[in-house]
Image: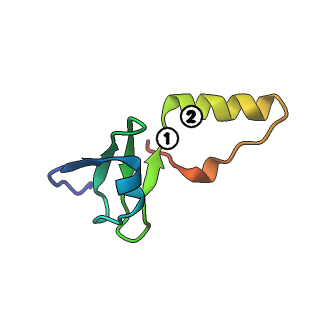
Amino acid sequence: MANRSQVNLEWGTAAEIAATALTARELVVDTTNQRLVLMDGTTLGGKNVAMIADVTAAIGALTSGGQANFTQWLFCS
């Protein structure tokens, strides 16, 4: 069974987010890059939540013989 809790969204610039490690499972809106960042409580800057455009571009790079770095994103399902 899933745990339920209230969602609290924070926001800040990319520079502000990169300099902080907020509480685990806290979502932050990056107002510089217009994306979500999920914090884990220890990693400065948290993990970017992958957007469809990120995944599509990475798959395109792989299928054209290039390389893609999937470790930079956190995939949510």
Total of numbered circles in the picture? 2
13 versus 63 height, above or below: below
Q: In which quadrant will I find the N terminus?
A: bottom left
- Between 33 and 8, the residue placed more toward the observer is 33
Q: Which residue is mark 2?
A: 54
Which residue type does callout 2 highlight?
Asp
Find residue 67 and report its image quarter: top right
Q: Is residue 58 left or right of residue 21?
A: right
Do the residues bearing badges 2 and 1 touch, measured as CB atoms within 8 Å?
yes
- Please name the residue shown 16% across and 55% down the image: 5
Q: Position of residue 61 (x, y in %)?
A: 74, 32
- Please name the residue shown 61% across and 53% down the image: 71
Number of residues whose C-alpha sits closer than 10 Å to that of mark 1, classed few (under 14), some (14–19) or many (20 or more) = some
Which residue type does callout 1 highlight?
Ala
- Please name the residue shown 61% across and 28% down the image: 56
Q: Which residue is mark 1?
A: 50
